[in-house]
Image: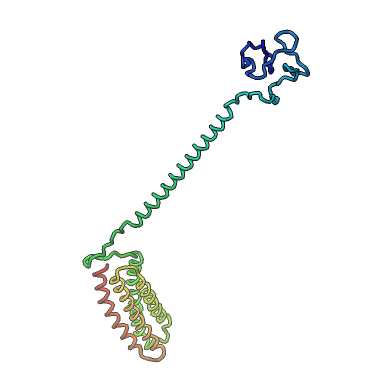
Amino acid sequence: MQYCSNCGTALPEGTDVCQNCGQGVNLVKPMGGAAGHVPAQGGQGLSAQGGAAWRQGSQPPLGTPMPPRSSGDSSGKTGLLIGCGILLVLGVFVLVLGGLGIYFYNASDDDKSAAPKTMQTQPSAKETPKVQDSAAWNDLVREKDEIDIAIGEVASRANQHLSRYPNFRNAAGLMNDARYAMERAQRAESRASALDVDPARRNALRALFAIEVKRAQGLYKGMVDSSNGGDYSYGFSDGTTASYAFDEANAQFNSLYK
């Protein structure tokens, strides 16, 4: 009968591997003692030569076949490598998708910028251009009519003054009103020149304000000359001429643009 040198289990003759602990080396016969028991010294079994028998966990004697290694370590490493490979493939796939997305996004922007722009047709000669600054236009048209009334009132008061006095030496308030009407017409003319409207409309309105400046200026000049001892008739004559010109131009303007 043979005994396993590792665990002491009795082994049948011709057995190469211990069915108890799986070892298959240094099968020895016990040195004395009862069958099935291997004497121990210091907790170690004795070999056939009297030396300490090899125990699991210690360095086996030279020439002793090593027990087969468990496949658990290699399978773990293989799984880790496979997992890293899958992550690497997924990372490359994400990068490729991101690159394709950026490429097609930029390509769509290039297509938009390269698309031909719609041609804007110019209005024909028969079409009436639209007034772009309609609010400012309407405001200045009202201003034109109000200045016309204001100058007419100054002229009427000047005639009434002459019916009572020979000159305008004591008519400071009347002269100030004439000067104010002149300056008001000058400001309106500047505003009309900056209107964002059809040029024909803009020029017609601006010309009316320029005539009103001359009307008020004639009245103001005549009264100033008279207050300084001169003749008011030269200034008043210029104002009257401008007044006739305004009436004609204003009638034409109203027929076209009001």
Q: Is residue 95 above or below residue 77?
A: below
> Where residue 121 appears, x then y in whole percent?
26, 63
Task: Examine the image and state in which quarter residue 159 appears.
Answer: bottom left
Tell whether 36 sits left or right of 168: right
User: Which is nearer the eye, 144 or 17?
Assistant: 17
Q: Which residue is situated farthest in the bottom direction here?
A: 229
What is the number of callouts on the image?
Answer: 0
Where is the C terminus found, in terms of image quarters? bottom left
Query: Which is nearer the eye, 18 or 227?
Result: 18
Relative to the observer, which residue lies in front, 72 or 228? 72
Extreme residue toward the right, this view: 42
Percent position of residue 75, x then y:
55, 29
Q: With respect to residue 235, does 118 lie above or below?
A: above
Q: Coloured how?
A: rainbow
Quadrant of the rendering where the N terminus is positioned: top right
Coordinates of residue 171 in the picture (x, y in percent): 41, 83
Between residues 198 and 29, which one lies in front from this camera angle?
A: 29
Residue lying at 35% horizontally and 85% vertically, measured from the top left? 162
* Residue at x-position 55% and y-position 34%: 80
Horizontal side of 178 relative to 60 (left or right) equals left
Residue 29 falls in image quadrant: top right
Q: Position of residue 120 (x, y in %)?
A: 28, 61
Question: What's the residue at 32%, 69% (across, down)?
Answer: 141
